[in-house]
Image (spheres, rainbow, N blue to C red):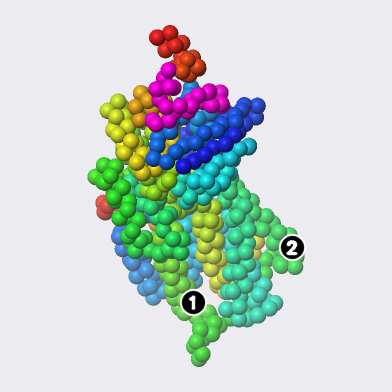
């Protein structure tokens, strides 16, 4: 009994004192979700800026902004898991890539109907995330991160080595369809402005939907799981289903980005599944502020633009990503939203 | 009422709980005492669904609940506290309590907006008042004093409206004054629920218990009202030590 007891005690202490990156991120995210008024204002200002951006941006930067929003979906999905359920996923790109490949293959070989592609991609991601989630969320902390990381890598390697779906070259020449929205009203992706506002509008809806979904009894149980998952069963909740629902939901949001990506770039490649995309999403949420939902979207815009600008000078832009990651983990673990909260001093102080 | 029959659990070669049987009657305080390593906490873990017993039965109000997972037992009305404070330190006191009240709400409301779920908040506020925690309702649990955290431990259990309240050393690390308060508190709760208590503080146990079970090396050594336990030579020898036996 003593042994078991000591084990319980040891895990307890580990949980509270561990200085790992994930633990730091978690601690930083604890309070940020409580300060919702300032976050709403931040979201509103971001939306206004985003709405007028194409007027000044020109076509290259408008398309870059679309890409930022699509990658922002992965960042948002990372935030649902990390900021609410306390699960650090290093493989959210798997769902982005999966949806991108399903969409690309459907357009190339099966149909030009956007709605049918949407349905197929969403269903395949749903099934895959349900199965993987059911296995992965039984593991805690770093083990969850490792499982998600390795599955994403496996998917990346499989696509890389399968000639039938393009192998290392990926799939190119994906036709860009038009979406029949209503009878007589079709949306043309060829027009950058239409494309941009469509994606912006959908990402807004995803953001609002996620916020609504997490501002519920369901969300409050997730926050409890993040805070102390061991105690949750004693309140009469089975953490498994809550975590699984959050996981499946997060996967769907990442999948939306992947669904649109082939239409933006006209190609898909194995790197979309890769570690680089997954970790970039984590850095994006960290930069914006974990647990804020709007932060990761902002982070995505910042990182994507920074990378594009720096990438035109040097190929080693990943170094920049690494430096940003370190700086934020060490000096600003609650991200830009956390900084804003402390600067404007609204509500409670965020514990470091 | 909760009835344990022939419960056993081993960790490797160690028989942590060895054919343990007892009953905890409603509206009574039943205490489990015993020296360190006697198997008290393991017995608790077996009853509350933290661990699965190797053999034996756990019955709640006559229904077999052996090996049920903790979340289902909680729904059935078994609430337990922890020896090492085990709360949601990053959430407010009110949120800690509310989560528990909320789990009693029907399942189809789990996607209702939080501010529309007023019943759990009302109930949580009542409980906070009862436990004298209403002034720190918005405080983070992590910022409370140890004594208040221990009080939240019990409050969070009562939020489940349990039939069986299992308290694992509720006064651990408390000052004598605080212990006395908890003492009164537990007594007042006993009118409503079956209380099962593990306690190191012998004075507290003898003061408030209706029934005492003494465990030693995984087995039940003795069972009876506090006076008989105090008088039993076997208990003195095993638990209270040689000095008491001599006195």
Q: Position of residue B142 (x, y in %)?
A: 35, 40
Is the residue A138 above or below the residue B106 in the image?
above
Q: Residue at x 43, y 8 (%)?
A: B246
**Subunit that carries the residue with mark 1:** A
Q: Position of residue A242 (x, y in %)?
A: 50, 56
Q: What's drawn in magenta, residue-wise?
A: B209-231
Q: Position of residue B176 (x, y in %)?
A: 30, 25
Q: Residue at x 57, y 43 (%)?
A: B66
Q: Residue A162 — which label?
A: 2
In depth, the one of B222 and A340 nearer the eye is B222
Q: Is residue B230 covered in magenta?
A: yes
The quadrant in which residue B201 appears is top left
Q: Report the residue that reaches farthest toward the right.
A: A163
The quadrant in which residue B85 appears is top left
In the image, taking residue A9 as reference, residue A124 lies left or right, namely right
In the image, taking residue A35 as reference, residue B160 lies left or right, namely right
Q: Residue at x 50, y 91 (%)?
A: A184
Q: Residue A195 — which label?
A: 1
Helix, strand or loop at disc 1? helix
Q: Disc 2 or 1, which lies upstream in sequence?
A: 2
Can residue B159 be seen by looking at this rendering?
Answer: yes
**Subunit that carries the residue with mark 2:** A
Quick check: do tags 2 and 1 share a chain? yes
Q: Quadrant of the N terminus of chain A?
A: top right
């Amino acid at each position: 009994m003593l042994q078991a007891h000591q084990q319980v005690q040891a895990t307890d202490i580990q949980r509270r004192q561990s200085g790992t990156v994930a633990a730091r991120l978690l601690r930083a995210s604890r309070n940020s979700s409580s300060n919702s008024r300032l976050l709403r204002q931040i979201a509103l200002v971001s939306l206004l800026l985003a709405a007028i951006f194409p007027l000044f941006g020109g076509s290259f930067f408008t398309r870059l902004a679309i890409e930022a929003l699509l990658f922002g979906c992965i960042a948002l999905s990372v935030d649902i898991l990390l900021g609410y359920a306390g699960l650090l996923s290093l493989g959210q790109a798997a769902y982005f890539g999966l949806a991108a490949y399903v969409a690309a293959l459907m357009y190339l070989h099966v149909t030009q109907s956007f709605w049918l592609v949407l349905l197929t991609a969403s269903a395949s991601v749903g099934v895959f995330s349900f199965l993987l989630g059911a296995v992965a969320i039984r593991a805690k902390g770093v083990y969850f991160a490792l499982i998600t990381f390795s599955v994403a890598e496996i998917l990346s390697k499989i696509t890389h080595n399968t000639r039938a779906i393009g192998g290392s070259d990926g799939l190119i020449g994906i036709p860009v369809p038009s979406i029949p929205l209503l009878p007589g009203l079709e949306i043309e992706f060829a027009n950058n402005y239409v494309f941009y506002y469509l994606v912006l509008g959908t990402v807004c809806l995803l953001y609002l939907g996620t916020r609504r979904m997490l501002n519920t009894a369901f969300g409050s149980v997730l926050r409890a799981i993040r805070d102390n998952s061991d105690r949750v069963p004693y309140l009469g909740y089975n953490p498994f289903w809550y975590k699984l629902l959050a996981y499946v939901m997060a996967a769907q949001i990442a999948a939306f980005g992947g669904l649109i990506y082939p239409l933006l770039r006209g190609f898909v490649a194995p790197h979309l599944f890769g570690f680089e995309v997954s970790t970039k999403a984590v850095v994006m949420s960290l930069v914006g502020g974990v647990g804020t939902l709007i932060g990761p979207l902002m982070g995505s815009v910042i990182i994507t633009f920074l990378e594009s600008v720096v990438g035109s000078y040097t190929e080693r832009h990943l170094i920049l990503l690494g430096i940003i990651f370190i700086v934020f983990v060490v000096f600003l673990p609650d991200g830009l939203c956390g900084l804003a909260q402390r600067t404007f001093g609204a509500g409670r102080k965020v514990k470091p | 009422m909760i009835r344990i029959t022939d419960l056993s659990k081993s960790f490797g070669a160690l028989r942590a709980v060895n054919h343990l049987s007892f009953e905890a009657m409603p509206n009574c305080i039943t205490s489990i005492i015993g020296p360190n390593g006697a198997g008290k906490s393991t017995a608790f873990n077996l009853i509350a669904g933290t661990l699965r017993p190797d053999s034996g039965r756990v019955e709640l109000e006559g229904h077999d609940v052996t090996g049920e997972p903790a979340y289902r037992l909680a729904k059935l009305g078994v609430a337990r506290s922890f020896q090492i404070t085990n709360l949601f330190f990053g959430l407010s006191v009110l949120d800690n309590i509310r989560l528990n009240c909320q789990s009693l709400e029907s399942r189809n409301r789990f996607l209702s907006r939080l501010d529309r779920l007023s019943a759990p908040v009302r109930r949580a506020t009542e409980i906070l008042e009862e436990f004298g925690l209403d002034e720190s309702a918005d405080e983070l649990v992590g910022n409370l004093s140890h004594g208040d955290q221990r009080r939240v431990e019990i409050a969070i259990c009562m939020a489940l409206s349990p039939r069986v309240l299992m308290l694992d050393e509720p006064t651990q690390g408390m000052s004598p004054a605080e212990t006395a308060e908890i003492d009164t508190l537990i007594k007042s709760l006993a009118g409503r629920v079956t209380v099962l208590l593990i306690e190191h503080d012998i004075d507290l146990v003898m003061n408030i218990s209706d029934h005492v079970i003494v465990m030693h090396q995984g087995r039940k050594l003795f069972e009876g009202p506090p006076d008989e336990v105090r008088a039993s030579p076997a208990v003195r020898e095993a638990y209270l030590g040689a000095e008491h036996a001599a006195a």
